[in-house]
Image (cartoon, rainbow, N blue to C red):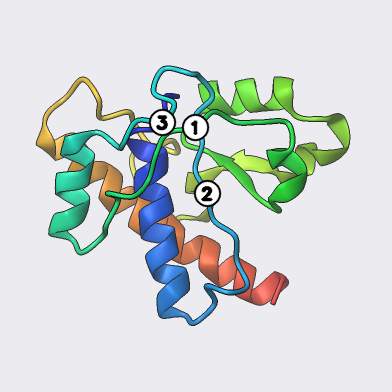
Amino acid sequence: MGNICRSPTAEAVFRARVEEAGLAQHILIDSVGTHDYHIGKPPDTRAQRAASQRGYDMSMLRGRQVEVADFSRFDFVLAMDCDNLGILRRLCPEMQRGRLGLFMEYASRRHAEGEVPDPYYGGADGFERVLDMVEDASEGLLRHIQKTLI
């Protein structure tokens, strides 16, 4: 929603996977929020701490809000949950709605949820859970891209 917890975590994790695969020059990656709560702000310190413990650097990321141009700029516009997906559907031009989806659609392991839960109001374990889910979905998304687009 505000682009300081889940989305920047997904951006950092997916960026690391893409770099490991040697595809950084071919894949544009960004994260955005659907609300303007934290534009220009760095990711939540708890999200940064959890990510850093796994080797991901989020320190340079800053929150921004989705723009209509994003729907044509990116092949995939993936939401962390159904509420945000609904907002994206309302903002997205009809011709580009096929680019929308849930990030967890690319996860290979079974998780209790099909959505990435918002850890903002919880403890450190919530940020660890988000990382587990995002790492799984990032690997699946990269495999999908490698099979279909590259």
Residue under circle 3? Answer: 40
Instruction: Give residue 4's quadrant in the image.
Output: top left
| Image location (x, y in percent) of residue 49 | 14, 46
In the rendered image, the vertical position of residue 76 relative to residue 85, given as above or below:
below
Confirm or deny contact between disc 1 and disc 3 (CB under 8 A): yes
Q: Relative to the observer, which residue lies in front, 46 or 82?
A: 46
Q: Is residue 108 left or right of residue 91?
A: left
Confirm or deny contact between disc 1 and disc 2 (CB under 8 A): yes
| Image location (x, y in percent) of residue 48 | 21, 45
Nearer the observer: mark 1 or 3; the answer is 3
| Image location (x, y in percent) of residue 135 | 34, 58
| Secondary structure of the residue carrying numbered label 1 | loop
| Secondary structure of the residue carrying numbered label 3 | loop
Checking the image for residue 64, the label placed there is 1
Sequence-wise first label, 2 or 3: 2
| Secondary structure of the residue carrying numbered label 2 | loop
State whether residue 108 appears in this view: no
Q: CA distance from mark 1 to mark 2?
A: 10 Å
The residue drawn where x is 70% and y is 26% is 89
Q: CA distance from mark 2 to mark 3?
A: 14 Å
